[in-house]
Amino acid sequence: MGRILAVDYGLKRVGIAHSDSSRKIAFPIKNVQNERFLDEIAEIFASDSYDLVIFGIPFRKDGTEGDLATEIREVAKQVSERYNISVEFTDETLSSKAAVGIIVDQGLSYKKRKQKRKDKLDALAAAVFLQNYLDKGQNE
């Protein structure tokens, strides 16, 4: 059983995280610029074995999918077809807020928190929704 890859897709940056091989714990990998995402994911797939990719879908307060959902589903389709890998979707609502909380809880100075938010926030958000997915036992 391979790892699960998680993608927090955004217009500017894409956060990438993955599970451990036992599919119990999520780890942030990196943030990449949106235009480099497909190149970066090729390198990630070449370096490790993955069975599934989870894409986060933003939802509005009324429960409907956010504006970016259509683009996310199209990118997910490209990834699935190009790498012959299963793709699923999960609710990413509040994952960025939870990621900010993780950064704040580290007790860093304002300057270091600001830099870490820029460097790691999207990958942490992907790890947050992947961990929620793993905790719910949806990966079995």
Image (spheres, helix red, strand yellow):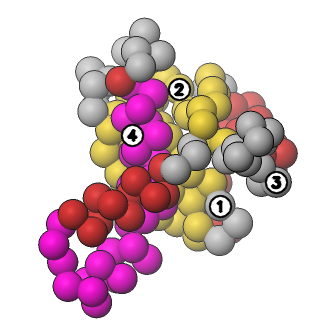
Q: In this view, does 14 lie to the left or right of 17?
A: right
Looking at the image, the residue that sits furthest to the front is 62
Tags 4 and 2 touching, CB below 8 Å: no
Q: Earlier in the sequence, mark 4 or mark 2?
A: 4
Task: Identify the residue under disc 3.
Answer: 67
57 versus 116 height, above or below: above
Q: Is residue 134 visible?
A: yes
The Cα–Cα distance between marks 2 and 1, rounded to whole angstroms, is 20 Å
The Cα–Cα distance between marks 1 and 3, rounded to whole angstroms, is 11 Å
Q: Earlier in the sequence, mark 1 or mark 3?
A: 1
Q: Which of marks 2 and 3 is nearer the N terminus?
A: 2
Disc number lying in front (2 or 1): 1
Magenta span: 106-134
SS of the residue under disc 4:
strand
> Residue placed at 27% from the left, 69% from the top?
104
Task: Identify the residue under disc 2.
Answer: 52
